Amino acid sequence: MANTDGNGYTIGFATVMVFVVGGILAALATGLKPAIKENERFEKQQSILYAMGVHENGDDTGSVNFIATDKVEEAYTNYIKESFVFQNGKVLEGEDAFKIDMKKQSKTPKSERKLPLFVGERDGKKFYVIPMYGKGLWDAIWGYVALDDKLIVQGAIFDHKGETPGLGANIKERYFMDDFLGEQIMNGNKYAGITVAKGNNDPKNETKDDNEVDALAGATITGDGVTAMFKSTLKSYIPHIQNLK
Amino acid sequence: MGLLSKKDQKLILDPLADDNPITIQVLGICSALAITAQLKASIVMAVSVIFVLGIGNVVISLMRNIIPSKIRIIVQLVVVATLVIIVDQVLKAYAYTLSKELSVFVGLIITNCIIMGRFEAFALGNGPWRSFLDGIGNALGYGVILIIVGFFRELFGSGTLLGFKVLGDPIEKTGLYATGYENNGFMLLSPMALIVVGLIIWVQRSRNKALIEEN
């Protein structure tokens, strides 16, 4: 056996290892990219539709049931009638709202930020679906919220990159997301957003005009992140929605 | 178990009890504290670690004679990271929903000290088959503790098991909650995981005095 302690051997081994591992991962990533991109596109369509109430939840109150991936493409074209991109208070022409990366937009200054909005129609009712992006405790959180003409929440869906399982990760559970249904984002004529509140004495969430939903135990920072994301995102959309209706 | 010799059986069975990676070697504590607030997360993590540690130990064992000792830790890290990323990417392409469930665990698996510990302590000095058994055994030992801790934390913290409301509904005040019982929110926080692990260590050592170290 060769001397495995020598400097030359060590450097040689490291170099070969980098190339072999890099090669394997690069080949894999390139090979799987189309399939992964396709999955991500379906997921985005599923989430947008979910927010406006197109899902397969049925009477089951436990889990999130998206519309099936083989049907989502068709459903998306059926339900989503229009989409807009706003920038600095005006409609931006020639942009595909679906292709806008919210993560990139969250890093641009407010005056240059592109704000995509999806307008859907279901059973003769209009839904304005707004994508959101913000920070949780460990990493990014994002979601979609659907508002109606009166700026009442008709549906919300959240997701996260790395919140703690069992605690912050529960923002993607039905019992948290469903609390937002019917909740108002205005307090009288003033914009209030929705606060994820601890101890709001309303765990069943029967008061829909208090601009509050019940927080998750052990997930204060994630909850605050949801509050902040909700408040700042929706604020910039309200004038646009009021113009559209 | 006619398949395995006595020595091989020990590789699988010892980590389950008297050589448990969490309660005896005190490895892998970080993930045991972080993700055991729910039983389901504990089970997912246990299965993932069984898979990664089983295969990783074999890979390291096959490479054990060519790994330069000066950079062996880096090599081990690269092997486990590569394995985990391959699994993650393949799942993302062909089982997207499952990959979303697992995504949070990817980072936790790579940095799990049990994995590095077994590579270093066992796979570098033993053949592939014995390393495989050692990997499976230690991952099982880890998983058992994770599931025990997850069971108690979810039961007392949320009153549920795998999401099912086994103690009744805390908001509607049915079942046990009708008697005035309340969930213990403290169980959901990491310090309680440490205390539960401590209780397991206590029970284990009081049953088997040989495990108690002399000071």
Image (tube, grey):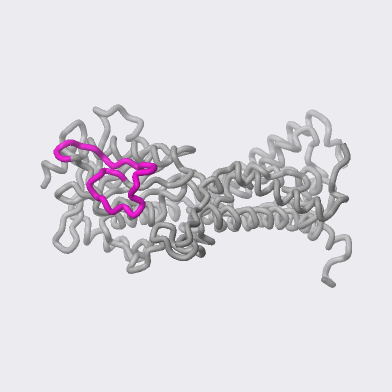
Give how far across and how far down residue A107 sits, in percent. 35, 31
- Depth check: B71 or B205 in front? B205
- Asked which quadrant contains residue B195, the reply is top right
Indicate yes or no whether the magenta region holds residue B185. Answer: no
- Depth check: A177 or B60 in front? A177
Give how far across and how far down residue B74 sits, in percent. 70, 36
Residue at image coords 60%, 57%: B151
- Asked which quadrant contains residue A50, the reply is bottom left
Horizontally, residue A29 falls left or right of residue B199, namely left
Whether residue A101 is visible to the viewer of this picture, yes or no, is: no
Quadrant housing the N terminus of chain A = top right
Residue at image coords 31%, 48%: A144
- Asked which quadrant contains residue B107, the reply is top right
Residue at image coords 30%, 44%: A212
Horizontally, residue A121 falls left or right of residue A221, namely left
Give how far across and how far down residue B94 sits, in percent. 49, 59
Give how far across and how far down residue A49 sits, in percent. 29, 57
Horizontally, residue A204 falls left or right of residue A188, namely right
Looking at the picture, does residue A192 appear above or below residue B161?
Answer: above
Whether residue B181 is visible to the viewer of this picture, yes or no, is: yes
- Depth check: B37 or A29 in front? B37
Looking at the picture, does residue B81 appear above or below residue B163?
Answer: above
- Depth check: A88 or B214 in front? B214
Horizontally, residue A157 falls left or right of residue A127, namely right
Indicate yes or no whether the magenta region holds residue A205. Answer: yes
Residue at image coords 81%, 52%: B206
The range drawn in magenta is: A188-212
